[in-house]
Every structure is written in structure tokens, then in C-alpha cells.
Amino acid sequence: MFAKFFEKLNPTPPNNAPEGSEKLTDLEATVSVHYGIPSTASILAFDPIQQLLAIGTLDGRIKVIGGSNVEDLLFSPKPLAFKNLEFLQNQGFLVGVSNGNEIQVWDLENRRISSSLQWESNITAFSVIYDTHYMFVGDEYGYLSVLKYEEGIMELLPYHMPPNLIAEAANISMPNQLAIVGLLPQPSSHGNRVLIAYENGLIVLWDITEDRAALVRAFKQHQSKDEIVVYASKNASEEKFRASSDNQEGEKEISSLCWLSSDGSILAVGYVDGDILLWNISVPGKKSPEAEASPSYVKLQLSAGDKRLPVIILRWSAKNTQNGCGGQLFVYGGDSFGSEEALTVLNLDWSSGIKALKCVGRVDLGLDGSFADAIVVSNANETGIDDASSLFVLSNPGTLHFYDKASLSALKSNPEKKHADFAVKYPTLVPTLEPRITVAYLYPVDRKWNSSRTPSEEVMVAQIRPAHGVTELEIKMPLSSIPRQPTKDDGIERILVAGYLDGSVRLWNATFPVFTLLAVLESQGIQDTGPRTAISALDFSSTALTLAIGHQCGQVHMYSLKGQSKTTSSNLATDAERDGLSR
């Protein structure tokens, strides 16, 4: 349904302006179509209901990709990076928090900011309450606030909880200025409870309706000789040992967190020192005596080294089992300094209780470039008892990989293979540097040809096969905007033809924002090598289905794209003609 959102026409100049009086500076030029992932992409958000993926950039842009060939680019008023990006799911709105602490609500139908609010302090945590218009905001001073968006207006509700009131209600001591670093609405609480994580490691499960702390967890309260540590190194699937309390820290700085259970009873917290603690957040009196007697946390370590990387990202994909005591934990960080950059996948199981936590497997996903973000998405049509989620991994510059359940399972059985062998890379079918592009033209296709083409002319949409076709894995990507092989029922309105330094020519169906590669034509019969093979001129006739290609060396090829095969004829141009071709 969101396809119509991005079909708006660009603004036109006023009719009363004198003809010919427009200046270049007066023209409101806008980007009507943007292809691919921006090179400065840094953050992801996903709406599983509408199947929309949003990609925020370091310069204030938001790329939105979705079904029905939807691709659009939104521009913030200020070119600032986003530190938070979330959908108001199934409502057509996207919320972004900029590095300038401006909260923006984007109206996707009208491609504009519907409402914005400039925050007075530094926003350090943000979360949208699922299936509502409400949002939690935490700042550098430890204040918890609530926002509501309705009918185009974002409203700051009269609910402000300073840290001293939370400390008093929880009967704990807390500094006056203690930043909130994480806010997670507790699952199945309908937004009535929110988990508040403070930078010093303090965790409070806060009941909004009763203004009280339902649970408090702090690492410094658990300096126990019986601490359970699960050690998941690259060389051993699991090692469990008892740690001594002699070297325990007083506080641990939190760097990431996520829920590991649908009822909000198990919480994974990543720390700056590289540790991961799985906390038991079961509220006393709500569970069995065995659950109450279980330890407050279990420590998970990716490396036994003393110096480890901060745990920057934690993402969870639960197994579709009745007890919900297992799944895949995706971790960025936590390994020893100097280790190869990777996103680590841990297969965890605690079906016998959190005290008996097992790491039954580990796989490291290598990255194309530096890591930017990762997000777990639900498989809407998933059935059976198995992993029920897939994964998007964003790396720099502007590279997006997708892993479904099958590809993640294949990685587990073939850990020595490169991750790219099992992932679907978001298509970048218009290369500009490898190989280097020298000339390109966008040609309109005669509408009469689309409506009255002969069977032999079906080659343009059915018989020219993509040189790098869509694989089976690509079809499983949850976004239906990925390229598909053209069918005989499709019409072509625009064709993009590009020539390259290596003498090759590529043709794309440019009818939709996501281009479909039709063919790659390699240089033939050219004795020269090097720059002289470069394409210097192109011309295409959509009525005659003929393509003319001129090379820097002066040779011209004519391609007829009718029939079952492409026929060619060549002609050698003079030096003077060669100069004309290059213009």
C-alpha cells in the first residue's frame, strides 16, 4: 500500500512567471529517484508489517526501501547523523533522533517532516512503545520523559521522572546526574513497564502506572565466588567455570542491551569491558520458587583476554519454541583487541534454566568494510519450530547484506567459508568505478513498441537474460523491491545504457527505481588494449531496437537486439570521425 506514497510529482514553477525568466538558482531541483544505498549509511530501522526498511545516513538523509519497487530518499533540514531511527509500525510514520537532539516524525505518505521537537538536553536513549504512538526519551541527566504523536502533533506529556525520584522509589543511592543509556519497554506489559539502564550499570524495571521500581539490578551487588561464566571462544564451543571475586569491578559501564525472551524475563546487557551479562529480570512472586532461586545473571565472554572490545551491538533472534529458551544472539564487539572485525553469531540454549546456559555454536560473519549497524527482522511466513528471523547487516561504504534462516544455518555448517557466499547483497547493478564508467544515457522507449511488439521483439523483456541473474537466496529477501527477471507481460518505459573503460556496455530496464540488468555486451574484434578500448559514444533506437557503440580507438559496433540473438556489424572510423564520437 505504500507504493503510492512515493509517486508524487515534483513541484512545478508558478504559471505566472514570464517565459524564459527562470534562473538556475530559481529552479527547485529535487531528487525524483535515488538508486542504491547511500555511501554514508549508518543506521537501520524496519517495519515488519509494511515490509519497509529505513536507512539513516551521517548527513541527515533517510533512504526508504519497500515493496512494489518503492525507493525514496528523504532529506532532513540539517545534515546531521541519526542516533536513533524507529518506525511507528504499520502507521506510515518514521521517527528519527538527530545528533542535534531534534526528534523528527516523518510522514511517509507526504515525504515530509510532520512534526519535530528540539530537546533541551542531550538525548542518550530513545524507544518507541510497540503498536502505539508513545515514545520514551532518556537524557544525559537521567530524566525519563514520555512523548505522544497524534494527528500531526508531537506532544511532551506531563510525565518526567528525575533520577532522584526513581532512586527514592527504588530505595537505592544514585548520583544526581547519571545518564540513561538504554530504554526498553518490557514485552507483554503494554507499555506499562520500561527497563531503564544507566551508564554506571544500574538497571531498573520501572512501572509507569504505579510509579515504582518493580525490580533493581546492579552488578556491584553480585560479587560472588559462585559467578557462572560461559566462555564462547572461536576455538571452543563452550567452557563453563567458576570465577573468583577477587578481581570483580565495583561498577560496569553499559554499552548495549536487548531482550532475550518474549515475556521480558531475560535481558542481555553488553558492557564497555567486553562482558555480556544475561540478567534474570523475573519479578519476585511472579515465578516459581525454582525461578526465584536461580542466579541473577550469567556472564558470557567471547574471549578470555584481559583486554576486550566494548560490546556495541546486541540483537536477538528467538527460536520458535514453546518455552522460548534459546535462539541466536548477534554481537558486535566483545572480542580481544586486534581480532578481525566481524559480527558474531552465538547459538544459545537455556531450556534447563538460565543457570544451565549453553553456547552450542559460534560463527563470525566477516564484513565488507567497517561495521555500521545490524537489525533482526521477522519472517512473516515462517512456520515450524526453528529460527524465525532473518538479519540485515550494514557496513561502510553503503553495503547491505541479508541473511535468511537458510543462509545462517549454512554458515554454521561451513564456518570456514566467506559470509558473502551465503548472504544476499543488496543489488548495486550500476557500477561506476569497477569497471569505470565513461558514458551513459537514459533512453525513453516508444510506448507504441510496448503495446504492439512482435514475438521476436519479446527479447527485450524475456529473452535477454541478466548476466548476473537473481539467485534463489535473493528471492527470499523480505523486501519485494529487489530486482526480478523481466517477464513477457512487463512493459519497458526507459532503458539505461552505460559504456565502460574496459570496452563493455551494460543495459538496464530503468522503468522502476530498482533497475533490472538486461545484458552485458563485451567488446569484440578490437585489437587495441587499454584506454583505447573505452566506450566513447552510445546511441540507441527503441523503435528499431538497434544499439550503436563507439570505442575510443575509432571502431563502431552496431547491435540489433531483435530476434533470438544479437547480430553485429562493425565499421572503422577515421581519426576525424573518432573525435566526433568522443564529443
Image (tube, rainbow, N blue to C red):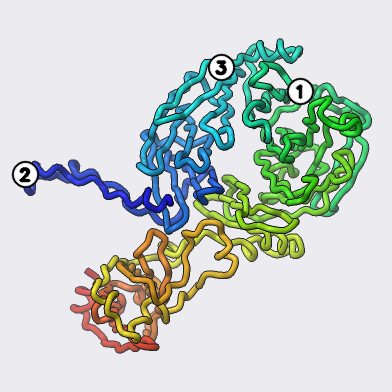
Q: Is residue 320 left or right of residue 183?
A: right
Label 2 vs label 3, nearer the camera: 3
Q: Amino acid at mark 2?
A: Pro
86 up-or-down from 232: above or below: above
Q: Amino acid at mark 1?
A: Leu
153 up-or-down from 535: above or below: above
Residue 18 numbered tag: 2
Quarter of the figure that contains the C terminus: bottom left
Label 2 vs label 1, nearer the camera: 1
Whole-percent x, y for residue 171 in the image: 76, 12
Disc 2 to disc 1, C-alpha distance? 70 Å
Dot 2 or dot 3, earlier in sequence: 2
Whole-percent x, y for residue 241 in the image: 92, 40
* Tag 3 residue: 159
Disc 2 to disc 3, C-alpha distance? 55 Å
Dot 2 or dot 1, earlier in sequence: 2
Circles 3 and 1: CB atoms closer than 8 Å: no
Please state which of residues 213 and 423 is positioned toward the viewer in this rendering: 213
Whole-percent x, y for residue 20 in the image: 8, 48
Dot 3 or dot 1, earlier in sequence: 3
Which residue is drawn at the image coordinates 93% and 37% (left, top)?
A: 242
Which residue is drawn at the image coordinates 50% and 72% (left, top)?
A: 468
Whole-percent x, y for residue 21 in the image: 8, 45
Residue furthest out toward the left: 18
Please state which of residues 5 and 58 is positioned toward the viewer in this rendering: 5
The reply to whether residue 397 is in sight is no
Q: Amino acid at mark 3?
A: Tyr
Mark 3 residue element: strand
* Tag 1 residue: 215
Mark 1 residue element: strand
Disc 3 to disc 1, C-alpha distance? 20 Å
Which residue is drawn at the image coordinates 57% and 27% (left, top)?
A: 136
